[in-house]
Image (cartoon, rainbow, N blue to C red):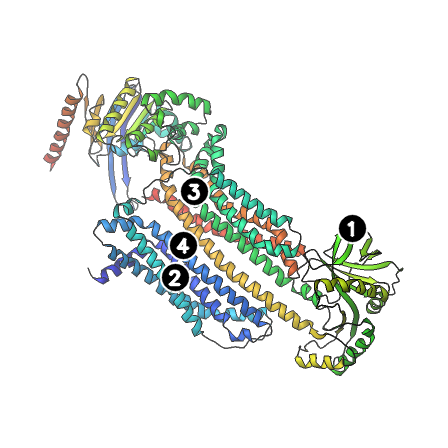
C-alpha cells in the first residue's frame, strides 16, 4: 500500500455571492510510496498551492479522497485535525514561519510541546536532528539573528523532530540565495536517503531536479511525470526544462 | 505637482488610516472642549461673586494649569504613536520620489485638518456645555442660577492659541522625524524584528525598592502633618516603582518562569510566557500609564467625594451651633462679665435664641514625655491640643449634675489613645472618667493629629495649669501669652444672618467693660458654604480631571490593542500552520489579552490599598475623621471604575479580534 494516495481530487472555489466558480483542481490522481522524494511542479495558478493546502489538511477538498497510511484525511474531525497534522505531517514553508518570540530551540520544540512531551524526551530527540542539520550552535539564538539558510534549517528541524510520516515542503528554497538553496536541497536529499518521505511543491527547476520523481500539474490535474532513475542533476535539470517548455508550447498551441 | 494634489493626498491618508486617526481627532476635540470649559469657568464672574466662590475660582485656576500640561503631553504622545505606525508609508513615498518638503506638506495638511476639526467642534461643544457646567457648579454651591448665555472671548482666544501651539510642536516633531530617517530605513522600520527583551535585574530590584519604600511610608506614618510632607515623596516613589516594574520587573519575572523547564514546556505556558515577554517589552510603558492613570482617577474621585459628602460632619465639629461668638481674653475672672455682655449682644442684635450653650476654656498644645504623661508645651507634630474647662461650665451647658472628686477629671478624646485611666497633666495626676461624646465648636480639630477636652473639678485647677504653661510658652514665643476663650453658641429658627463687619463691630462694642483680645461672630450656615465651595472646587476638579484621564486611558488601551492586533495577526497564522487548532490559539491569546489588560487595574487596586493609610491621615487635616466612610466611598469608586474598565475592555477587545480575524477574510 502506498503511503499517500490521492484519488479524483477536485477543488472548486465559489465566490462569496456564488456567481463565480473557479476550478482550482479538476481531477488529481497520484500516489507516493514510502521513502520517496517527490516534487510537484507547475506554473503560478496551476493549482499546486491548493493541492498542497489540501494535503496539509489546511483546506478541505470539494470531492475525492486522500489516504495517508490508509487513513482518509477528509474523515478526520475538525477537532482532531490539528493533532493529526502535528503527529503525522511535517511542514517546511517558503517564509520559514518561525516565531520571533521563541529562540531556535524553542521553535523546534513547538510541535513536541503541543504534543505534551516531557522536557527530557524533547531534549533527547533534539540532539540527533540538530546535529544532522548542523545547527547545534544556533539553538540559543533567535530567528531574527539568523540568515535565511539557517532559518530554513531550523524550520526543517522543526518539521523532522516529530518523526512525521510525510514532510510537506512549500517552495522551501523560494526565499534563499543560491548557496543556501544548495545546502537545503542537499539536506533534503540526505534526510530522504535516511528514509524520510518528502513531498515538495516548487517551480524551481533546480529544486525539482534533486527529487526522485517530478509531477507536473497543469490546469488542475497531473499532466506528466518524470522519474529520475539513474540520471544526474544536470541531466534531470535538462529533462525538466524541456518538459516545462513543452508544456508552455502546448499551452500556446491551444490558443 | 500642484498644492491640491498634496491636499488630496493628505485627505486620502486620513481616510485610509481612519482607524487610528479618528480616535486621535476625537481626543483632540475632546481635550479642546475641556480646556475651553475650564478656562471659561475659571474666569467666570458669576462664580467669583458667590459667597466662598473665590476658593472655587482658585481651584479652577489650578485646574487650567493641570489640563494644559495634560493636553500637551497627551496629544504629543498620541501623535508620535501615529507617526511611528506610518513610517513605512512615508518611506514608500520617498522611494517613489517625494521630497522631504513634500512630505512635510502632507503632514502639515493632515495636522491642519485635525486642528480645524478640533477647534470647530471642540470650541462649539465647549460653548454649549460650558453653561451646563456652570449650572453644575452653582448647584454644587447651592446657589440660585442667574440665567443667560455667555461666550467667553478670553477663553476662546486662549484655547485657540494654546491648542494651535501644541499642533505646531507636533508638526515640528513630525518634520524632524521624517527628515532624520532615510527612505530605506523608513521602509523597513515596520519589519525589523523586536529583539528579545533582556531581564534587567538591577532595574527590577530598584523598582521593588521604590515601590516598597513608597508603601512603607504610607503604612508607617501615623501623624497627619508628617503625612502631608511625605505624601508626594511616596507618590513619586510609587509611580517610579510602577513604571520600572511594568517595564522591567515583568520581563524578569517571565524570564524566571522560562528557566523553570518543567513549567515552561507546557503547552499553554509555553506560548503565553514567550509572547508576554515581548508584549511587556512593547507595552510596559503603556501599561504603567494605564495603571497610574487608574490610580489617580480612583484617588481623586474617592477623596474628593468623601470630603464633599462628609461636609456636614466636618462643619459640625467646627461650628456646632447656628451662631457662635468667640472671645479670647486674658483674665479668667472676667468670664461672668463677658457672658453677660455676649448675652446682651444676642438680644440687642435681634437674635432670638431657642437654646444657648456657653463656656470658657484654656487652650494649650502639650507634648508627652511618655504615654499619658503630658508635661510640656509643644508645637511639634506629636503635640495634642487640650481644652481645659470647669465642671461648673460643663454641668450648666450640658444640663447635667456630675460631681468630681478633687483629682478626678472628665475627658473626651479624639484620635488620641489613652492607655490607662490615669492622665498626668503638667505634674499633676488625675483619675480619668472618659466621656463618650462632647461636641462644642472645636476650631482645633482640623489642625492637629488629635485633641482632648478635659473637664476639671475646680477653677483653681485651670489657673494652676495656666501658671505652669505661661513660662513655658514664653520660652518658645516671647511675644505670645496664653489666653482664655469664651464660647457662646445659640440655635434659632432664622439661620440666614450673615457675618458682617457691623455685627463684629457691635460685638466689640458690647464688650466695652472687659479686656479682650479678639471677638468674632460665626454662622454655621456661612461656614458651611465656605467649606462647601472649597470642597466643591476639589470635587469638581477631581471629576473634571478624572474624565480627562479616563479618556486618555481609553485611547491608550485602544491603540495598545490595535498594535498588538497587527502583530498577533502574523503570529496567529504561523501557529495555525505549525499545527495549533483555532480553539487553542484563541484560548492562549485570550488569556494573554486579559492578563495584560487587567494587570494595571489589579496593580491600581493594590496601590489604593497601600495609599489608604496615608490618604486617610491627610483627610484628617481636612477634618474628615470618619475613616469607615472613606473606606466605603473608595470601595464604591473602585467597583464603579472596574465596571467602566470592563466596558472599555469589551470595546477595545472587539477592535482587536476584528484585526486578528481579518486574515481569514482575505
Residue at horizontal 73 percent and vertical 55 percent from the top: B416
- For the N terminus of chain B, give its image quadrant: bottom left
Give the crowd class for mark 4: few <14, some 14-19, many >=20 residues within 10 Å.
few
**Element under label 2?**
helix
Which of the two labelled residues, at mark 2 and mark 4, occupies the earlier sequence position? 4
- Alpha-carbon span between mark 4 and mark 3: 18 Å
Which of the two labelled residues, at mark 1 and mark 4, occupies the earlier sequence position? 4
Relative vertical location of residue B461 with respect to residue A84 in this rendering, above or below = below
Viewer-side residue, B333 vs B395: B333
Viewer-side residue, B491 vs B465: B465
Q: Which residue is mark 4?
A: B77
Res. B65 in view: yes
Question: Looking at the picture, do discs 4 and 3 lie on one chain?
Answer: yes
Percent coordinates x, y for residue A223 in the rendering: 19, 28
Q: Which residue is mark 1?
A: B419
- Alpha-carbon span between mark 3 and mark 2: 29 Å
Q: Which residue is mark 2?
A: B166
Q: Are marks 4 and 3 in contact (CB under 8 Å)?
A: no
Residue at horizontal 44 percent and vertical 73 percent from the top: B154
Q: Are marks 3 and 1 in contact (CB under 8 Å)?
A: no
- For the C terminus of chain B, give its image quadrant: top left
Q: Chain of mark 1?
A: B
- Alpha-carbon span between mark 2 and mark 4: 11 Å
Q: Which residue is mark 3?
A: B281
Q: Nearer the viewer, mark 3 or mark 1?
A: 1
Which of the two labelled residues, at mark 1 and mark 2, occupies the earlier sequence position? 2
Amino acid at each position: 500500500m502506498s503511503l499517500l494516495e490521492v484519488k479524483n481530487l477536485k477543488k472548486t472555489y465559489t465566490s462569496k455571492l456564488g456567481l463565480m466558480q473557479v476550478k482550482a483542481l479538476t481531477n488529481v490522481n497520484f500516489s507516493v510510496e514510502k521513502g520517496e522524494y517527490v516534487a510537484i511542479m507547475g506554473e503560478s495558478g496551476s493549482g499546486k498551492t491548493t493541492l498542497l493546502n489540501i494535503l496539509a489538511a489546511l483546506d478541505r477538498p470539494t470531492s475525492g479522497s486522500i489516504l495517508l497510511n490508509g487513513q482518509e484525511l477528509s474523515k478526520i474531525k475538525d477537532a482532531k485535525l490539528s493533532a493529526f497534522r502535528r503527529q503525522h505531517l511535517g511542514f517546511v514553508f517558503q517564509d520559514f514561519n518561525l516565531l520571533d518570540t521563541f529562540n531556535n530551540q524553542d521553535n523546534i520544540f513547538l510541535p513536541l510541546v503541543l504534543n505534551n512531551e516531557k522536557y527530557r524526551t524533547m531534549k533527547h530527540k533534539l540532539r540527533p536532528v540538530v546535529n544532522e542539520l548542523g545547527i547545534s550552535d544556533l539553538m540559543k539564538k533567535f530567528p531574527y539573528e539568523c540568515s535565511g539558510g539557517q532559518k530554513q534549517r531550523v524550520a526543517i528541524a522543526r518539521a523532522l523532530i516529530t518523526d512525521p510520516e510525510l514532510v510537506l515542503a512549500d517552495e522551501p528554497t523560494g526565499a534563499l540565495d543560491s548557496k543556501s538553496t544548495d545546502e537545503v536541497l542537499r539536506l533534503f536529499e540526505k534526510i530522504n536517503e535516511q528514509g524520510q518521505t518528502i513531498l515538495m511543491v516548487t517551480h524551481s527547476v533546480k529544486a525539482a531536479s534533486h527529487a526522485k520523481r517530478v509531477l507536473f500539474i497543469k490546469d488542475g490535474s497531473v499532466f506528466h511525470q518524470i522519474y529520475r532513475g539513474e540520471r544526474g542533476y544536470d541531466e534531470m535539470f535538462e529533462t525538466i526544462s524541456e518538459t516545462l517548455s513543452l508544456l508552455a508550447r502546448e499551452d500556446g498551441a491551444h490558443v | 505637482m500642484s498644492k491640491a494634489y498634496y491636499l488630496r493626498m493628505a485627505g486620502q491618508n486620513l481616510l485610509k488610516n481612519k482607524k487610528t486617526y479618528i480616535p486621535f481627532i476625537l481626543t483632540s476635540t475632546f481635550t479642546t472642549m475641556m480646556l475651553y470649559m475650564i478656562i471659561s469657568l475659571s474666569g467666570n464672574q458669576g462664580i467669583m461673586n458667590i459667597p466662598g466662590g473665590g476658593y472655587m475660582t482658585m481651584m479652577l485656576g489650578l485646574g487650567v494649569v493641570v489640563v494644559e500640561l495634560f493636553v500637551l503631553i497627551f496629544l504629543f504622545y498620541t501623535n508620535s504613536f501615529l507617526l511611528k505606525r506610518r513610517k513605512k508609508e512615508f518611506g514608500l513615498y520617498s522611494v517613489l520620489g517625494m521630497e522631504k518638503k513634500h512630505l512635510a506638506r502632507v503632514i502639515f495638511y493632515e495636522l491642519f485638518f485635525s486642528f480645524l476639526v478640533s477647534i470647530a467642534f471642540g470650541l462649539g461643544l465647549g460653548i454649549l456645555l460650558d453653561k451646563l457646567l456652570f449650572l453644575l457648579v452653582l448647584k454644587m454651591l447651592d446657589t440660585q442660577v442667574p440665567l443667560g448665555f455667555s461666550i467667553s472671548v478670553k477663553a476662546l482666544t486662549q484655547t485657540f492659541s494654546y491648542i494651535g501651539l501644541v499642533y505646531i510642536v507636533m508638526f515640528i516633531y513630525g518634520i524632524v522625524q521624517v527628515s532624520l530617517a532615510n527612505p530605506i530605513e523608513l521602509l523597513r522600520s515596520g519589519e525589523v524584528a523586536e529583539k528579545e527583551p533582556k531581564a534587567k535585574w538591577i532595574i527590577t530590584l530598584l523598582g521593588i525598592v521604590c515601590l516598597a519604600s513608597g508603601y512603607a511610608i504610607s503604612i508607617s506614618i501615623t501623624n497627619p502633618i508628617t503625612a502631608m510632607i511625605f505624601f508626594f515623596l511616596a507618590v513619586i516613589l510609587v509611580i517610579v516603582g510602577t513604571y520600572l516594574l511594568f517595564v522591567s520587573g515583568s520581563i524578569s519575572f517571565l524570564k524566571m518562569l522560562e528557566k523553570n523547564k518543567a513549567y515552561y514546556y507546557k503547552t499553554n505556558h509555553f506560548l503565553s510566557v514567550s509572547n508576554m515577554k515581548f508584549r511587556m517589552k512593547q507595552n510596559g510603558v503603556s501599561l504603567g500609564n494605564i495603571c497610574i492613570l487608574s490610580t489617580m482617577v480612583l484617588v481623586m474621585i474617592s477623596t474628593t467625594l468623601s470630603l464633599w459628602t462628609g461636609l456636614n460632619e466636618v462643619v459640625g465639629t467646627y461650628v456646632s451651633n447656628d451662631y457662635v461668638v468667640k472671645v479670647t481674653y486674658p483674665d479668667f475672672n472676667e468670664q461672668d462679665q463677658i457672658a453677660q455682655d455676649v448675652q446682651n449682644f444676642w438680644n440687642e442684635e435681634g437674635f432670638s435664641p431657642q437654646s444657648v450653650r456657653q463656656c470658657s476654656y484654656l487652650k494649650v498644645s502639650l507634648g508627652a514625655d511618655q504615654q499619658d504623661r503630658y508635661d510640656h508645651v509643644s508645637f511639634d507634630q506629636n503635640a495634642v491640643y487640650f481644652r481645659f474647662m470647669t465642671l461648673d461650665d460643663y454641668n450648666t451647658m450640658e444640663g447635667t449634675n456630675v460631681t468630681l472628686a478633687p483629682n478626678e477629671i472628665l475627658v473626651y478624646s479624639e484620635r488620641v489613645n489613652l492607655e490607662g485611666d490615669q492622665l498626668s497633666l503638667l505634674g499633676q495626676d488625675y483619675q480619668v472618667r472618659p466621656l463618650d461624646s462632647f461636641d462644642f465648636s472645636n476650631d482645633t480639630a482640623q489642625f492637629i493629629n488629635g485633641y482632648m477636652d478635659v473637664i476639671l473639678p475646680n477653677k483653681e485647677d485651670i489657673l494652676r495649669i495656666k501658671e505652669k504653661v505661661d513660662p513655658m510658652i514664653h520660652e518658645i514665643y516671647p511675644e505670645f501669652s496664653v489666653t482664655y476663650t469664651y464660647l457662646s453658641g445659640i440655635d434659632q429658627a432664622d439661620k440666614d444672618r450673615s457675618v458682617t463687619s457691623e455685627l463684629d463691630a457691635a460685638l466689640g462694642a458690647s464688650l466695652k467693660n472687659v479686656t479682650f483680645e479678639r471677638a468674632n461672630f460665626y454662622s454655621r450656615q456661612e461656614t458651611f458654604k465656605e467649606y462647601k465651595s472649597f470642597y466643591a472646587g476639589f470635587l469638581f476638579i477631581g471629576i473634571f480631571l478624572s474624565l480627562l484621564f479616563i479618556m486618555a486611558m481609553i485611547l491608550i488601551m485602544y491603540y495598545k490593542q490595535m498594535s498588538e492586533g497587527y502583530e498577533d495577526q502574523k503570529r496567529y497564522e504561523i501557529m495555525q500552520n505549525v499545527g495549533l487548532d483555532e480553539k487553542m490559539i484563541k484560548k492562549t491569546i485570550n488569556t494573554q489579552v486579559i492578563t495584560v489588560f487587567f494587570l494595571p487595574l489589579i496593580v491600581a487596586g493594590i496601590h489604593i490599598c497601600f495609599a489608604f493609610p496615608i490618604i486617610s491621615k491627610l483627610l484628617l487635616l481636612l477634618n474628615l475623621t470618619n475613616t469607615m466612610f472613606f473606606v466605603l466611598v473608595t470601595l464604591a469608586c473602585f467597583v464603579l471604575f472596574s465596571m467602566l474598565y470592563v466596558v472599555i475592555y469589551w470595546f477595545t477587545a472587539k477592535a482587536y479580534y476584528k484585526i486578528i480575524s481579518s486574515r481569514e477574510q482575505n
